[in-house]
Image (cartoon, grey):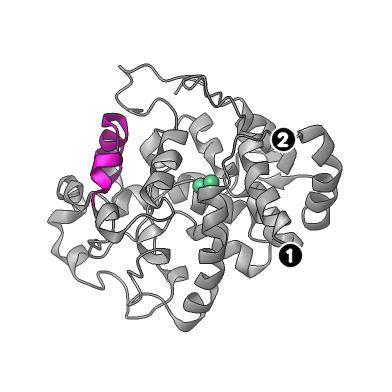
């Protein structure tokens, strides 16, 4: 995809930019919204977002997920520091919205600063800073539906707690009876580590950083887009006790992801010394991507 606004003729990238998905999710879970209003989630989605979900649900099959894991999880795309990855992600310019010209790094800093203001541990702040760096997948040339979107397990029945469940009818896995039972290819309460999730920026950044971050942060990174589970309590039949405990952290993280976007522009220069120390505390100079 291009590094600026995707043309409307770009069928693989129906949203003007991937932030449209983040904005849509934030509107879906707007504070004070009733369950009934939430159920009307389709009304909040613009045609680009709706088309994005149509593609995401149609194409995120078990075979596709295995292919992407094979392609990316060897982490053989070169070494980069956290900062180099952030600068790289920053080349994904959003010039479609004249009102918010915040860079990707600024969005990440708004999340981490909100976490820091609430006095959370340093690794929690760091999770905020890095949680969306997996969006560099876009710059590797992957379509929007393979980078962002609500994530969900593949190889088992789709929960009706996933938005736009009707779009799963077009997924090839819908025609495979073995994949459409409650447990599908999995065992009851087998633990999410044994479950393959739809592919996207969450699973990628989790794998890139898992050797360096404490476990609650790993869960935050890996499952922050798994709304059906952390917001709606779906898929507990695949989770084990440990997942249940760790999801308290995922739920703690989510409001910072959703609601920290503000008008105030973080001063990267002023904040940089703090974050350079923080990154250096957990990460070596460069890591494999
Ligand atoms: Fe994200
Ligand atoms: Fe985010």
Specify the segment rendered in magenta.
40-57
218 to the left or right of 34? right
239 to the left or right of 280? left
- Judging by the rendered image, the residue that carries numbered circle 2 is 84
Q: Quote the CA–CA distance across marks 2 and 1.
A: 24 Å
Mark 2 Cβ and ligand 1 under 8 Å apart: no
- Judging by the rendered image, the residue that carries numbered circle 1 is 121
Q: Is residue 47 magenta?
A: yes
Q: Secondary structure at mark 2?
A: helix
- Identified at 28% across, 62% down, the residue is 155
Between discs 2 and 1, the one toward the N terminus: 2
Q: Answer above or below: position of 240 versus 233.
A: below
Residue that extends furthest to the bottom in the rendered view of this protein: 241
Mark 1 Cβ and ligand 2 under 8 Å apart: no
- Residue 102 or residue 229, whichever sits in front: 102
Quadrant location of the N terminus in the rendered image: top left
- Identified at 40% across, 63% down, the residue is 231
Q: Position of residue 98 (x, y in %)?
A: 51, 19
- Residue 176 or residue 255, whichever sits in front: 255
């Amino acid at each position: 995809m291009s590094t600026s606004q995707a043309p409307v003729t770009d069928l693989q990238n129906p949203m003007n930019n991937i932030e449209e998905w983040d904005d849509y999710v934030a509107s879906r879970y707007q504070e004070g919204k009733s369950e009934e209003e939430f159920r009307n989630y389709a009304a909040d989605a613009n045609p680009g977002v709706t088309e994005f979900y149509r593609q995401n649900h149609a194409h995120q099959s078990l075979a596709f997920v295995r292919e992407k894991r094979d392609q990316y999880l060897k982490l053989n795309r070169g070494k980069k520091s956290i900062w180099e990855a952030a600068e790289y992600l920053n080349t994904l310019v959003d010039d479609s919205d004249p009102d918010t010209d915040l860079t990707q790094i600024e969005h990440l800093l708004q999340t981490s600063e909100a976490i820091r203001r609430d006095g959370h541990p340093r690794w929690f702040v760091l999770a905020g800073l890095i949680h969306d760096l997996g969006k560099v997948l876009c710059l590797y040339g992957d379509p929007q539906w393979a980078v962002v979107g609500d994530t969900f397990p593949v190889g088992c029945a789709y929960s009706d707690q996933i938005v736009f469940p009707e779009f799963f009818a077009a997924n090839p896995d819908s025609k495979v009876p073995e994949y459409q039972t409650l447990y599908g290819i999995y065992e009851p309460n087998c633990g999410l580590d044994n479950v393959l999730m739809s592919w996207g920026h969450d699973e990628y950044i989790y794998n890139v950083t898992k050797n360096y971050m404490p476990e609650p942060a790993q869960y935050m990174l890996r499952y922050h887009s798994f709304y059906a589970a952390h917001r709606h309590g779906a898929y507990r039949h695949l989770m084990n006790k440990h997942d249940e405990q760790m999801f308290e952290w995922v739920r703690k993280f989510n409001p910072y992801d959703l609601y920290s976007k503000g008008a105030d522009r973080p001063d990267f220069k002023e904040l940089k010394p703090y974050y350079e120390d923080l990154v250096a505390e957990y990460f070596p100079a460069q890591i494999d991507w």
